[in-house]
Each structure stands twice: as C-alpha cells, then as structure tokens.
Amino acid sequence: MHDTKLLQLIEEDILPAQQLLELLQAESIALHGRDMPLLEDILARKQSLIVLLDQHGRLRSELLASLNLPPDRSGAQALASQSHLGNQILAQLDVLAQLMNDCQAVNENNGRSIQLQQMTTSNQMRILMGGESPSLYDNRGSTSPLSKPRTLSQA
C-alpha cells in the first residue's frame, strides 16, 4: 500500500517537473531578450509548480518517515527493495531526479545570466551618472582627477 502511494507521488511529480524545466528554458530565452512581461508570466507559473513539487516532496518524506525510513532516496530504495513495485519506483525516481537536476542546471545558468545583466546595467548607470572615470594619464604622467558625478540629464 505504501509502495503504491510512493510510486503515485513520484509519478505525479514528473509532469510538473517537466513543465518547470520547460519554463526555465523559456526563461533563459526571455532573459536574453529582456522580455519583462514574459518573465513575469513565467515567474508566476514557476512559483505554482515549485509549491506543488514542494508539497509532494513533503508528502513523500512524511510517508517514508512514517515507515521509520530516512526521508530521502535511501529510504525510497529501502521501501522499493521490499516491494513488487520496486523497479518501477526506482525507475520513476531516477526520471524525477534527472528532471530536477536538469532544472537546477538551467536555473543556475539563468542566475548567472541575471547577475551578468545586473553588472552590465550597473556599469552603464555608473557611466551615465559620471561615477568613476577611467584612470587616464595626463601630459605630466599623473592620473587625471576624478570627475564630479553628473545628473542623468547632464550625461
């Protein structure tokens, strides 16, 4: 009975995990295109999928804990070893784990893209606002004095 419930919970997470991966891949494209309306839509859809996956993960952990098994992969493997559905449980668990690993990799790439865009925007704003001027040498060989910050209208 518990093995059937565990298998059902794992299988119910595969489709949302696939959808999350697709959203993360679409987010990557939207980030490069700086498509803010699309990014907002993706964020809302991502959040609902993450909440669903988190709830199912908790249910799986609670199910395993109720059987005095560790609430992780080793607990699922222990339950699978005692079940006629063991091979199915492990196969579906592998599919789900691979999807989650793929989601994590794409999410990390998206995070790096966001950081790069933030640094670029910050650098552009510093230039526009007249922040640090480049260290240039004048005709005497000394560095030029820093210019005073300017308002955006003077840039």
Image: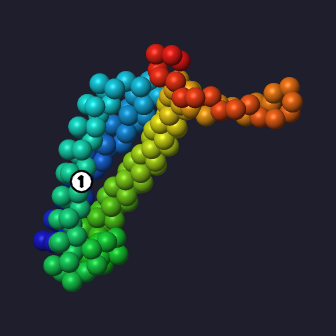
11 sits left or right of 74 in the view: left
Where is residue 90? Give x, y as percent.
Answer: 34, 65
Instruction: Quadrant for residue 2, please give it.
Output: bottom left
Q: Nearer the viewer, residue 24 or 153?
A: 153
Q: Residue at x 17, y 65 (%)?
A: 59
- Dividing the picture into quadrants, the one containing residue 148 is top right
Vertical relation: 21 (above or below) 126:
below
* 27, 84: nearer the viewer: 27
Q: Amino acid at mark 1?
A: Leu
Q: Is residue 99 visible?
A: yes
| Crowding near the residue tagged with mark 1, few <14, some 14–19, many ≥20 C-alpha atoms within 10 Å | many
Q: Is residue 82 left or right of residue 102?
A: left
- Image coordinates for residue 41, horizontal then vertical, percent: 26, 31
Classify mark 1: helix, strand or loop. helix
Residue 135: quarter of image: top right
Vertical placement of residue 40 versus 14, above or below: above
Percent position of residue 93, x then y:
33, 61
Does residue 80 appear in the picture of this structure? Answer: no
Q: Note whether 45 is above or below 100 in the view shown.
A: above
Instruction: Judge left or right: residue 63 versus residue 150.
Output: left
Residue at (35%, 75%) from the top-left corner?
74
Residue marked by disc 1: 53
Furthest toward the bottom, the residue is: 68
Identify which residue, 78 or 30, lies in the foreground.
30
User: Percent position (x, y) of residue 137?
Assistant: 80, 30
Q: Which residue: 31% across, 58% down?
A: 92
Viewer-closest of 69 and 122: 122
The residue sitting at 21% across, 83% down in the picture is: 68
Which quarter of the rendering shows the N terminus? bottom left
